[in-house]
Image: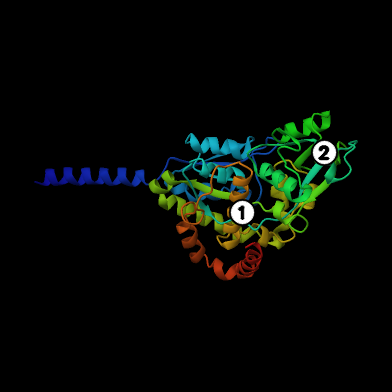
Amino acid sequence: MKTRLFRNLLAFTALTVVAHAADYPKVIRLGWVGNKYNKAFTGGIVGYAQETQAWEKEFAKEGIKIEWSFFTGTGPAINEAIANGKIDFASSGDLPSTAGRANGLPTRVIVGGGAGGGTRYILVGANSTIRKPADLKGKRITFQKGTYAHLGWLRYARDVLHIDGDKDTKIISLTGGDQDVALASGGADAIYGGGLDLVDHGVARIIDSIQDENHPTVALNAGSTYTTQKFIDKYPDVVYRWVKVYLQIADKIERNDQKALLRRLDTKSGSALKNVIAAEPDDYRYSNLPIFDDLFRISVEKAIKDEVTFKLVRKPFDVAGTWWDRRFYDRAFAELGLGAKWKDVIDKRAAKAKTLH
């Protein structure tokens, strides 16, 4: 009797251990947009998490490893990795994230978005005959197709140049480093979303800058951070803890009094400090705090609407109802008391959202 009871207890203990182990993955695989310098770093919230090993520490007691991947192929490459089951958490710009979902990727957005801000540039060769934005008609424009820059260029062509960005210019799809080579060698006439390093080297000059103040419909960029439905179903507690760490870091560093830290993180990917400063937003909290609200929803929906217009995706889909999964975010947001801490930003974003309806 005692022997059988002991055996049953051992069997139950073994089953409990197996069941508990099944609640956790052996590794959490993160996929982020790479950079043209091919350095395995990023900035902002995720850059700080990477530098401080925040997620490694959070999951250390369960023996879970954190695996980082930075894709020089940016958003489209992240979509491919998601489709092939190679990564668990990722972030990408508005076009790749929404196009991936529209084309059947089982992604679920688990973190709110920033309001956007900062500056992007359109560059031409230093000796180019292009003197004003209107001169870009008929020219060879380079950026990577399938990225935020693709949608941004088509919006810019429509709203600023009043032309068809596909038909009235020649698009050359290249990744960041190859764009620089193309412009410097005369293989392209302009870069949409180019960096200032080429300007520093005397190879390029700025023909226009993209900001919310001068080109609001173009500057809108509603990137998303997401995981997969399969990962949520299998490891809901891991998703919650991952999101909570993300929000804790956002609250700690996305502040104007942390500019030195944020600038240093941005330079780790290879950008010069003065260029980071030139492109940074005026208000880090407003631009970068990740918030689920009407502003984020409207920005994503506007991206999808334009993508359908430009024939980048075939049809729209429900954003807040079926793509977003706010459960983990809302729980962590409440536990961290962020509603009170971020009230000024939440109110400012609500006012902004009213202007976008």
Note whether 335 is above or below 25 in the view shown.
Answer: below
Q: Amino acid at mark 2?
A: Leu
Can the viewer see residue 80?
yes
* Whole-percent x, y for residue 111 in the image: 54, 54
Mark 2 neighbour class, 10 Å CA radius: few under 14, some 14 to 19, many 20 or more:
many
Q: Earlier in the sequence, mark 2 or mark 1?
A: 2
**Residue 136 located left or right of residue 10:** right
* Residue in view at x 48 percent, y 62 percent: 330
Q: Are marks 2 and 1 in contact (CB under 8 Å)?
A: no
Q: How is the image coloured?
A: rainbow
* Residue in view at x 75 percent, y 41 percent: 192
Give the number of the disc on residue 198: 2
Q: Considering depth in this image, is 2 or 125 the residue closer to the camera?
A: 125
* Whole-percent x, y for residue 39 in the image: 67, 37
Can the viewer see residue 290?
no
- Secondary structure at badge 1 equals helix
- Secondary structure at badge 2 equals helix
Q: Considering depth in this image, is 59 or 327 the residue closer to the camera?
A: 327
**Residue 223 located left or right of residue 335:** right
Q: Amino acid at mark 1?
A: Lys
Tag 1 residue: 302
Q: Residue furthest left?
A: 1
